[in-house]
Image (cartoon, helix red, strand yellow):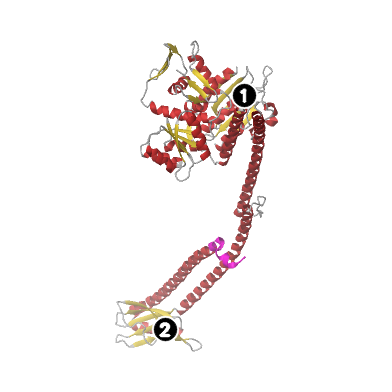
Amino acid sequence: MRWPSALRRTPFRLTLLFLALFTTAASALLLYVYFASRSEAAARAESGIRREMDSLTAIYRERGPEALNAELIDRTSKGGNYLYLLTDAQGQPGTGNVNESPITELRGPETWETFRLSAADADGRVARRAAMGVEVRMAGGESLFVGEDIGDNEAYLNRLSLILWGAAGIVFLLGLGGGLLVSRQVDGALGRLNAVVDAVRGGDLKQRVQVRGAGDELDELGENLNAMLDRLEQSMAAIRHAGDAIAHDLRSPLNRMRGRLEIAMIDAEAGRADGREALSQALDETDELLKTFNTVLSIARLQASSGPPDPSDFDAAELAFDMSEFYQPLAEDTAIEFSAEIQTGLIVHANRAFLAQALANLIDNAVKFTPQGGAVMLRARRRSSGEVEYSVTDTGPGVDEADRERILERFVRLDSSRSESGAGLGLSLVQAVAETHGGRVEVSEGPGVVDGSGPGLRVALVLPPA
Amino acid sequence: MRILIVEDDQDASATMRRGLEEAGHDCVAAPDGAYGLEEAHKGGFDVYVVDRMMPRLDGVGMVETLRREGDQTPVLFLSALGEVEDRVVGLKAGADDYLVKPYALAELLARVEALARRRETGSVQTVLKVGDLEMDLISRSVTRAGQDIDLQPREFQLLEFLMRNAGQSVTRTMLLEKVWEYHFDPQTNVIDVHISRLRSKIDKGFDRAMLQTVRGAGYRLEA
């Protein structure tokens, strides 16, 4: 993999983004630690100085200037961290361990100041160290300065901030390196996914993503991609199968028609017939072929659409009433007892025309396969699951259990029905209509064998609630 | 009557023309929607037959333009696509009827004549009369030669449609679409059964049968 391209990759960009966020947060934290430490050190120094000053002013108040002087001599000679200087009323520096007060101007009874102090360390190097102090005017006109060298505090703070920045630098470098590693790895996994997609786009539907078994979202993506490819492969196979079936089913009637027209042509040339009969037959056959063709097209379109075309909310019961009224006379004419059991208020969200067509196909089939004296029943009801069910039950010969799923397939005509007209598409269309509405078709046995006929067939079209 | 055929497929256009002229109609053909508009603007047509898919200006655009201009001449829309959505698009554009290709000439002729006729009888009628058959649309009663005929609601609608198109052939598909509002091909002869029921009610006991079967086309109510 080339690094420059890696820099454009999403995982690396995310790494950089998080790094930037982290660096900002770390800087804020470090600044806080720095300033908090500094103000804490200053507060500690101030309270020490104040305690010192308070004890000295108490001595002055209770025992007078001489006692203070003696105390100062005592304290400076003991050594310690504090700086003292007693200045007399005339402004002459007196007792103390500094030569002059760093505080040159007194503002009010108490004046606080921070300043730099020149001091030589053990090696004789002069350093300007940080210090702070307070000067207080006494009752007798003298002024007392007490201060403290806080250079150590400052050095500590400087060291602290150096350590903190160093830590931030290490975190940044580790994050950057880790980000690049992660980005390379994710990139590799995505690259494998991309390779599969490229291969599929090139026409190789057999390619599958190798799932690493890590259970992460990349694996999930891989599994989904594989599932999608499985579905795609199935659809392609189904389309090929349908194409073959269409070719097969249209070829024989076309051949038949061609043969008949050829004979009619010979007859007409020989003056034996004027060919009108043959032409009218050919026209009828063309109509049948076109009908088949249109049905196949409708099924294909329904299967390709993601939902019902042009849907509306309407009462499925009303459609069932209409349909039963429409088919009642036909059934009566063929001496079939037709009845309907329809619940009211079955609102569905569907394409009315396709649903009507599906119902018509179911009733047509039932009437076609039920012998005289039989019965056909149309039911429309709401199941306890809320689904709306249309079912048509007949008392015809029925369909063997083994064949029940098969009769929904395109162009499947059972041997027992070869003598009937039709291309074997009626139930396939019902199935396609059901599926495009998110429903299904259920095929089961009818009422059973009664008086030597039966067992009949029950086909149900089940739709999800609106 | 005068019919304007707007169709880009020359063969289809010629076949249509042959069929319509054979039935005694005058035809003018235009190869696309733009020419179709030009011809339509000249006026004097009883029906426009308009194909949906055409170069330059398609059928939907042409019909929309005509309707915007206030031309209320009936339009029969033709389309090779026959899906529900296409029918809706055609009717929304302002077409009066819709026919899916391929169609039988008899079907085209029946629909064109029905459209032209509907225009002639534009005024609202409350009583329809065909020969000695009378239909009162207000009281919803039917008599033949003064004799009451008892019809179911759907039979009444069926007869009303036949009477409004009396003397003309109407196809089974037209009946299915206009009377029942279904758009599919029944596998069985269900329409014929309804017609024969109606026939037994209006023709039984009379010497002359009014409801006739037209071979290869459908049915016709004759005075």
Frontmost residue, A119 versus B48: B48
For mark 2, does the 10 Å Cα neighbourhood hold few (<14), some (14 to 19), or many (20 or more) residues? some
Q: Mark 2, mark 1: which one is toward the viewer? A: 1
What's the magenta region? A1-14
Q: Earlier in the sequence, mark 2 or mark 1?
A: 2
**Residue A296 point in image, percent of width and height:** 60, 36
Say if residue B192 shows up in the picture: yes
Residue, disc 2:
A117
- As helix, strand or loop, the secondary structure at mark 1 comes to helix
Frontmost residue, B6 versus A162: B6
Badge 1 amino acid: Lys
Q: Is residue B215 above or below residue B52?
A: above
Q: Is residue A398 magenta?
A: no
Residue, disc 1:
A368
**Is A283 left or right of A156, judged from the image as shown?**
right
Q: Which quadrant of the view contains residue A256?
A: top right
Q: Marks 2/1: CA distance?
A: 116 Å
Chain letter for mark 1: A
Chain letter for mark 2: A
**Residue B171 point in image, percent of width and height:** 51, 26
- Residue placed at 53% from the left, 61% from the top? A14
**Is A246 left or right of B144, judged from the image as shown?**
right
Q: Is residue A6 magenta?
A: yes
**Residue B196 point in image, percent of width and height:** 53, 18
**Residue B23 point in image, percent of width and height:** 48, 28
Q: Which quadrant of the view contains residue A55?
A: bottom left
